[in-house]
Amino acid sequence: MIRISMLMTTLALAALPAQDLGSFIEWDKLSQKAAESVNVNLEGTLLELATRFLSSGKNGGEKTKKLLNDLKGIHVRSLKFDKEGEYSLSDVDKVKSQLKGPEWSPIVDVRSSKGGDNAGVYIKTDGKQILGIVVLAAEPKELTLVEIKGSIDPEQLRELGGKFGIPDLDIRKKKNAEEE
Amino acid sequence: MNEFEDQLREAMHRREPGPGFAGRVAAMATGARKPVRRSNPVWRWAMAAAAACLMMVTGVQEYRRHQGEQARRQLLLALQITSEKLSLVDRQLEKVEGIVQGIMVDERTKQ
């Protein structure tokens, strides 16, 4: 059975910093079991440098530049396993429990009780603007947590679709349909 | 013996130099005496320092470029993973929509 909750609430500031989310999963322990491990941490001057290099290319349109300039940090932890059951869903639940504060709005939360994919998109706001996005994807052989800091709407990520080798996204259509 | 003396006399016989010989010798002597211009050691040090600075600046620039390229690759990887996972969410929603639509069709059929 699949339980879905889709909320679009914009509430006040709260205390949990997004950078602590990753610490709720013991990545180092899990990465020893993983066949592939990706760990990206970009913030500050390194991120500025990366965005400068990225937006200076032929794909660097104005919208792309704005999107990249709004990025304040990006953290990705992703593990791919050879077999299923290498990580516990309780680890995922620990992270999800941290995304329930008043500042967090789960725009999509898909959970499969039959061992399928569990995925969610959460937005952090201060009541006026978006402060960050978290994408959590727990697949049978893959576990991924993405934290994007900055005033970026998921729709803006569509702007990057088809550029820099990133596939086109169509999440706006879905989001608008849900709002209606 | 006399023949040998004659040959010797002939060989040692004074001969006048060609025209302009004295002038050529004088010109060569003057040229040889041109003062050798030695470069100032301070200037040489300055040149070495400038070269070292240039190498350092080029090195730093190259390091920054390398660092920027690495950061760019990391950012791209992060954005690609984000994009993939958002697509996964999208696909999940499509599945759910399909299930919901199926249930609604079933209910209508029953009615």
Image (spheres, coloured by chain):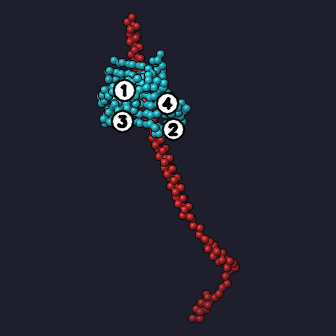
Mark 1–mark 3 Cα distance, whole angstroms, equals: 23 Å
SS label for mark 4: loop
Query: Label for residue A52?
Result: 2
Q: Residue furthest top?
A: B111
Query: Label for residue A37?
Result: 3
Mark 2–mark 3 Cα distance, whole angstroms, equals: 26 Å
SS label for mark 3: strand
| Chain coloured cyan in the rendered structure | A
Name the N-terminal-most of marks 2 and 4. 2
Whether callout 2 and callout 3 share a subunit is answered yes
For the residue marked with disc 4, what is the amino acid?
Leu
Closer to us: mark 4 or mark 1?
1
Is residue B64 placed above or below A35 in the rendered structure? below
Name the N-terminal-most of marks 2 and 3. 3
Whether callout 4 and callout 3 share a subunit is answered yes
For the residue marked with disc 2, what is the amino acid?
Arg
- What residue does disc 4 label? A160
Q: Sort mark 1 into few (<14), some (14-19) or many (20+) by Cα contacts within 10 Å.
A: some
Image point (38%, 21%), residue name: A110
Image point (32%, 23%), residue name: A115
Pinpoint residue B34: horizontal percent, then vertical percent: 62, 71
Closer to us: mark 2 or mark 1?
1
* Colour chain B is painted in: red
Pinpoint residue B39: horizontal percent, then vertical percent: 57, 65
- What residue does disc 1 label? A98
